[in-house]
């Protein structure tokens, strides 16, 4: 028998995979995410330790980071769009890692000479060090945001080509890497700080970022060489051009397709560059350019056909039903110890990984938009367990208790109530050094409420991560190439905005007795988010949303509303 061509051996296939652009992106993302997770975990611990176990520096840092992304997300995305891909990726990589290295070295100096710094100029030198740490760390976070936008939202799309299934698989793999590093990286740096010191921890993170930066830089260059399409960016704007929106979507003079013209995007055909005009030369005009970029970015995001899908994802950030410091602190007030919480966090990660795997399978069976609808319904159903937990035996839910009773009692100097310790645990995520005596733990019956709460949270992670991947791919496929940066930048800003609202909500009701109300409000926001997605899905598919497509039908029924690729 005459074979038509030589077949690849198993070794050749394995070699091709490990040298492919797809695998190199996975490797680079794993290194980058590992460093990010270590730094994000460690910097919170360092700031608490530096300020005498106070949360002040951590709170200031969190506020600065969230506010910066909220205000600069669109501008960062616009910078990503305006510049060549390799330049953006390399610059953001160098800035991010360099800032972490400098910040780590600065923290090492502060830890080593803190006593001497306190005495210099009445502590103003130490205060200046705190300001520098927070500022540099914030710059690193902004650079990390730029890296995430350009790699996860742009490079991945180009490497996947026109293959929607390959794009879904790559998105799912990237998310699994996120889940694994989110658990393993903090464990590693936590052990180093526990058996060594904070000084050693800072040195390790700085050294890691230095080595990782060199390897990531080489990987980016390899991916760029293996994917020629990365060298050309459709609709790339010149530096002199201003970010502007198109006219009304009903304007069909440009001859675009209905889907393409339905989005008032900011592509190059609508930009009229007048670099020599007096207006563009004025100093005032140049100074206000970032504000115009910010406004145009948000307007463009609002006019996207996937606006309600993106907004629905942002609404899921307005919740206390996640494994952050809020929920962890509440668990401590209900008698759960660190060992149990670590197991619950592991179960949550496994549930999230299952959700990413389920996403690829459901998308192939039902299409992308239906996958989001199914995932949203699954998440909402699981969160009903959290609502039930509010009224279950053992729940401390009691709105008659003043939210600030414990703070007031502490301020007037009376004997600290047990709830005050609970509040402290709630705020710092269980990082207290005083453990409640065993005899004060609630009886076994009282664990029903907290068990239902975490059962709902863990089960809902499957739907949550599957839904997140759905919206991510919808944005990737429906935003033209020249606009991916600014739209994803605004999406990050929306996520941070709702995340800030959720922290404000906790500040207004910080006691465990009010946590049940926060749970109900959180589930309400999740429900509103999925109602927005249902509006988007029904507008896109109509009554076909409730029909399950066979593989043959899916060829003719385009769920993802993908726009033609601009060449």
Image (spheres, grey):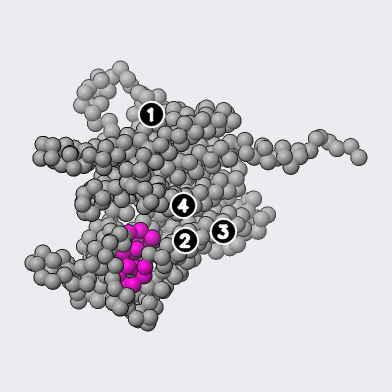
Magenta stretch: residue 456 in it? no
- Residue 445, by quadrant, is bottom left
**Percent from the top left, x then y, of residue 93?**
42, 34
SS at mark 4 in the image: helix
**Percent from the top left, x then y, of residue 171?**
53, 47
Which residue has dot 2 on it? 346
**Percent from the top left, x then y, of residue 168?**
56, 48
Q: On screen, 79 above or below 193?
A: above
Which residue has dot 1 on it? 271
- Residue 428, by quadrant, is bottom left
Tell me the distance, in whole angstroms, between the alpha carbons under discs 3 and 4: 23 Å
Tell me the distance, in whole angstroms, between the alpha carbons under discs 1 and 3: 42 Å
Tell me the distance, in whole angstroms, between the alpha carbons under discs 4 and 2: 10 Å
Which is more foreground, mark 4 or mark 1? Answer: 4
Which residue has dot 3 on it? 358
Tell me the distance, in whole angstroms, between the alpha carbons under discs 1 and 2: 50 Å
Magenta stretch: residue 323 in it? yes
Q: Which mark is residue 184?
A: 4
């Amino acid at each position: 028998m005459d074979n038509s061509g030589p077949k690849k051996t198993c070794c050749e296939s394995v070699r091709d995979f490990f040298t492919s652009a797809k695998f190199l992106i996975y490797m680079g993302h794993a290194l980058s995410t590992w460093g990010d997770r270590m730094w994000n975990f460690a910097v919170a611990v360092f700031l608490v330790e530096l300020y005498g176990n106070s949360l002040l520096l951590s709170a200031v840092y969190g506020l600065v980071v969230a506010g910066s992304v909220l205000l600069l997300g669109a501008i960062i995305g616009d910078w990503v769009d305006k510049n060549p891909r390799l330049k953006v990726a390399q610059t953001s990589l160098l800035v991010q890692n360099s800032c972490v290295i400098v910040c780590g070295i600065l923290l090492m100096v502060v830890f080593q000479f803190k006593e001497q710094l306190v005495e210099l100029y009445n502590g103003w030198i130490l205060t200046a060090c705190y300001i520098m740490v927070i500022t540099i760390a914030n710059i690193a976070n902004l650079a990390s945001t730029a890296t995430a936008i350009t790699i996860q939202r742009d490079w991945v799309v180009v490497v996947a080509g026109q293959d929607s299934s390959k794009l879904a698989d790559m998105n799912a793999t990237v998310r699994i890497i996120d889940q694994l590093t989110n658990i393993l990286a903090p464990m590693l740096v936590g052990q180093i700080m526990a058996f060594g010191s904070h000084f050693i921890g800072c040195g390790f993170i700085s050294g890691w970022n230095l080595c990782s930066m060199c390897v990531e830089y080489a990987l980016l260059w390899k991916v760029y060489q293996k994917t020629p399409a990365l060298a050309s960016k459709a609709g790339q704007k010149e530096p002199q051009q201003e970010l502007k929106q198109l006219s009304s979507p009903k304007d069909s003079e440009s001859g675009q397709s209905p889907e393409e013209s339905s989005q008032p995007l900011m592509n190059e055909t609508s930009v009229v560059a007048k670099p020599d005009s007096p207006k563009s030369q004025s100093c005032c005009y140049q100074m206000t350019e970032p504000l115009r970029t910010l406004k145009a970015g948000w307007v463009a995001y609002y006019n996207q056909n996937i606006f309600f899908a993106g907004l629905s994802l942002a609404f899921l950030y307005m919740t206390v039903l996640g494994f952050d410091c809020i929920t962890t602190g509440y668990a401590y007030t209900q008698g759960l110890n660190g060992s149990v919480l670590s197991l619950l966090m592991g179960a949550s990660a496994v549930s999230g990984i299952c959700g990413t795997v389920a996403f690829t399978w459901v998308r192939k069976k039902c299409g992308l938009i239906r996958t989001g609808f199914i995932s949203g319904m699954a998440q909402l159903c699981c969160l009903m367990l959290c609502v039930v937990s509010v009224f279950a035996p053992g729940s401390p839910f009691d709105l008659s208790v003043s939210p600030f009773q414990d703070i007031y009692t502490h301020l007037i100097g009376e004997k600290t109530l047990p709830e005050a310790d609970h509040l402290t645990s709630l705020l710092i995520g269980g990082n207290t050094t005083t453990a409640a005596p065993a005899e004060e733990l609630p009886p076994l019956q009282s664990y029903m409420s907290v068990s239902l709460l975490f059962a709902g949270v863990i089960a809902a992670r499957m739907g949550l991560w599957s839904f997140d991947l759905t919206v991510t791919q919808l944005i990737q496929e429906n935003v033209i190439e020249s606009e991916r940066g600014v739209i994803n930048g605004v999406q990050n800003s929306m996520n941070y905005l709702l995340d800030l609202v959720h922290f404000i909500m906790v500040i207004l009701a910080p006691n465990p007795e009010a946590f049940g109300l926060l749970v109900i409000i959180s589930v309400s926001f999740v429900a509103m988010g999925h109602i927005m997605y249902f509006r988007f899905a029904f507008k896109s598919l109509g009554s076909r949303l409730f029909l399950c497509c066979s593989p043959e039908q899916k060829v003719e029924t385009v769920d993802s509303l993908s726009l033609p690729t601009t060449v």
